[in-house]
Image (cartoon, coloured by chain):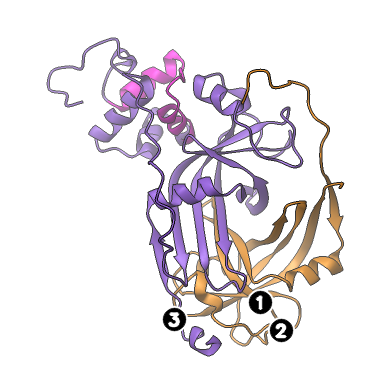
Chain colours: A orange, B purple
Amino acid sequence: VSATRARRVPPRSAEVEEIPDWECRKLLGSERVGRLGVVVGGRPEIFPVNYSLDETGAVVFETGPGTKLAGAVNDRVVFEIDHPTERGGWSVVVHGVAQHTTAASLRFPGPAHASWVGGRPYTLRIHPSRISGRRLVRPS
Amino acid sequence: MNVEADTGQSTIEELDAKECRKLLRSESYGRVAVVVEGQPLIFPVNYRFEDDAVVFRTNRGTKLTGAEFSRVAFEVDRPAANGLSGWSVVIQGWAYEATDLLDTRSEHLLRVPVPSALRSENDPLVEILAERITGRRVGTAPDADAALPAPSVAREGSGDLSRRLMLRREALGLSREAVARQARIDPGYLLYLERHAGASPGEETLAKLAGALRTSPDALRGAEAPEQGEDW
């Protein structure tokens, strides 16, 4: 950074807009990898996971038994997807409780949901208690 | 192909520290996870990896501003379009507001241009001190392109307090948590002291640390030769 860099603050170059619920749900169907946030021993942990949506719109992903993710069963978790672009991007965050499920009827029956976590599949489901989304809009 | 992948054929390769750092430097967009009132939260940030720390700007008044040290996790990933392969790097560490601290390292970080579409230079700068960095590559073999850049050189200023703290602790075989517990200071603050060569803790803190490290404050300050029999 040059020492002569102006100290004046440039005008903010982007704005944030809320994404309505219906569109958040649509965006959830557009991605294949998201990040799960859990609390383990009071500490935040974050894991990328492959996921699908089931018929009710719940987020479904697989993990191996005995993993930290499997320890998140019946806990409050957060799930995030995003899509950064040159001009801004968007992110959607789902809050809910992770529950073990055996018979998930997937809306997107994709392969190898467990590819990012490894281990034998152990299916967890997050029924959203709250969904929020933000879009970064940069004026052209 | 899809069916085969379903039988658990995906390969997972753990990435070493050098590779993780290279990947952290190669990206500028990641996600921070924090715990607020027992609840996990995730938010995306534009960041820069500098001096072995993730730095980003945030809103004033959020959980991460103020001088508090908060436990955070930070994640960066790059999945392939089909989502079945790619890599991810996760940092476990402590976040604090660099804007509030007066030491040479924080001053340096404050001058680092952090990319952000939303934030201005007046917004608080948050630094994440990494305690543990892990990474994995999923699905595909490692790409052999791009020779690794030179590893970041550890800041070993001649005889600074931060280095002596760390060397003494390691010589005693003590974990950071153990020393912090005994000195009754925040483990995040101890990590900060070990990483920031210019940091200067108060007399009381230094005395407590010296006690926990079974040495004297002067020895930690470098004002006195190590006692006989000390191996550091």
When the figure is inspected, residue B88 is found, relative to residue A15, above or below; the finding is below
The answer to whether the residues at label 1 and label 3 have Cβ atoms under 8 Å apart is no
Residue found at x 25% / y 38%: B173
Q: Position of residue B179 (x, y in %)?
A: 35, 33
Q: Which amino acid lies under the numbered mark 3 shown in the image of this protein? A: Gln
Tell which tag, 3 or 2, sits nearer the viewer. Answer: 3
Magenta-highlighted residues: B188-213
Q: Which residue is mark 1?
A: A52
Q: Is residue B205 left or right of residue B72?
A: left
Farthest-out residue, left: B229
Chain at numbered mark 1: A
Against A24, is B121 above or below? Answer: above
Instruction: Name the residue that disc number 2 marks.
Output: A107
The C terminus of chain B: image quadrant: top left
Q: Amino acid at mark 2?
A: Arg
> x, y percentage for residue B25?
52, 45
Dominant secondary structure, magenta: helix
Q: Alpha carbon of mark 1 to alpha carbon of mark 3: how far?
A: 19 Å
Q: Is residue B175 above or below residue B185?
A: below
* Residue density around tag 1, few if under 14, some if 14–19, many if 20 or more, within 10 Å: many
